[in-house]
Structures are given as C-alpha cells and as structure tokens.
Amino acid sequence: MAHPISIGRSFDLSGRTALVTGGSRGLGKAMARGLAEAGADILIASRHEAELVAAVADIGQGLPSRVQLVVTDLGRRGEVERLATQAVEAMGQIDILLDDAAMFPTMPLAQLTDEIWDQTLQVNLTACLELAQALAPGMIERRWGRIIHVSSVSARVAGPEQLAYAVTKAAACAMIRGLALELGPHGITANAILPGPFLTDMPAKLSEQYRRAVGERTMLGRWGQPSELAGLAVLLASDAGSYITGAELVVDGGLTARL
C-alpha cells in the first residue's frame, strides 16, 4: 500500500502557478503572499498599476517565487480573454485561479441604476466565469487545477444597502458548485471562501457605528486581519485540500454562527 504524501509536503505549492485577481491589496494581496510563501509563482491582476507594482515587491519579498503583474479592468468586456492569454504567456500555465476582484456598491434600492447593476455583475460574477472557461482547458489537460472564488457572508445574510453585491456573491457560490461538478472528474477542485468582517478598504465605505457593531457581534469580538485568510487559500490551492470541492467555507470570526 502506497504511503500518502506527508502533511508538510502536501501544502507545498512549488512548481505551481497562480493567477490572483484583485491581488494588489486587501484579501487578494494577503492570499497571494500566502500562496507565494507556500512556493507558488504568482501573477496578480487589478486596475491599479501603482498598487500592483508595490504589491509585487511586498508579495515577493524574501521569497524565491516569481511574482508578476498584469493591469486589467475586469469590468470591461474583452479584458478577461486578454488577461487569460497574458497570464499563460507570462507564467507558462495557470494551475490556480483565485478570484478576489470585486465591486462593492453601497446604496439604497432607489439609487441602484442599471449601469451599477450591470458593472457589479460583470466584475463579481461574469468575469469569474469567463476566466474559468479560459483557463479550465489547460487544467483539464494537466488533470490538476484549483479554482477558488472569494464570495462573502453577504451571500447568506443581508447587509444595509448591499443588494447588488450580495446577489452576485450568492450567485458565485452557485457557479462554484456547478464548476465543481463539471470539472471534478478532471482532477480540478472549485471552492468558495465566504469572508466576514475583514479590515480592508471595503469597510471604509461603511459607517463607524456599523463597523463597531459588526465587530462586537462576532464571537471573537473583532474584525479579521487579511493575513488570517491566507492559510485557507493555501489549503484549498494545495494537495492538502485535494478532497475539498464544491464547498462554501465561512471565515467570519463566528459572525453568522450566533443568533
């Protein structure tokens, strides 16, 4: 009987390549750093070139991993195909797709325009589907791949003035289940991470009173740090998580587990 791979080695991502959208800051940057620390080569993508340049230096600091960038606007049709092509050209192949790019419009229903709705749907959902469509054939050929989508606890619980965001995040979970079903026979896993309150740029749009109330409502009594999501990203991207697929993993300090 063959011995299973050791626990330590099962988290090793050496020789793997990852594309992280929204990787220039916040949770995307923290997870990209975690994947790089596990040995993966990283390509980060976002709209913000200056932030990308700074993030490349931070993510790769002290590590042997290659870290590169692509400036792209996933809110524009046609950009996804260009990103996928550039990613493969730059890295040789993409083994891990981590979707973190997102729009977070906050407004009452009466102010939610068609333009904002369509843009949120494009960035938070359609672009993720298109990237999976573009990169899955290579994963199928290699019979190994990981698709990780950063959804949100907003997919399960309502927040004030977050309708468009919540709808796209809930739909993304359904998309992940469908991808897991279709791609599983080819050795590819697909999972969703549902973060709760993390201290990133997005909460800055919410009132201080609301932020305080949310932090106090978690079982840990605080907001999370972006680095606290990196370990889960590594688990799902590595052989250590090879039997996890079609899952929605909540990381919210116990926010949604209490009445």
Image: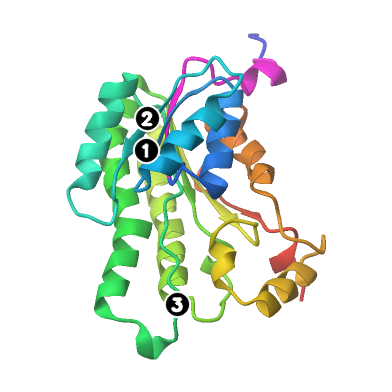
Disc 2 and disc 3: Cα gap in Å?
35 Å
**Mark 1 lies on residue:** 183
Q: Is residue 256 above or below residue 231?
A: below
| Residue that extends furthest to the bottom in the rendered view of this protein | 110
Disc 1 and disc 2: Cα gap in Å?
5 Å
Q: Nearer the viewer, mark 2 or mark 3?
A: 3
**Mark 2 lies on residue:** 186
Magenta range: 5-21
**Mark 3 lies on residue:** 163
Q: Is residue 54 visible?
A: yes
Residue 75 at what x, y percent from top left?
28, 57
Residue 150 at what x, y percent from top left?
50, 51
Q: Give residue 224's quadrant in the image.
A: bottom right
Residue at 31% in and 34% down: 136
* Relative depth, front residue between 41 and 249: 41
Q: Is residue 72 left or right of residue 108?
A: left
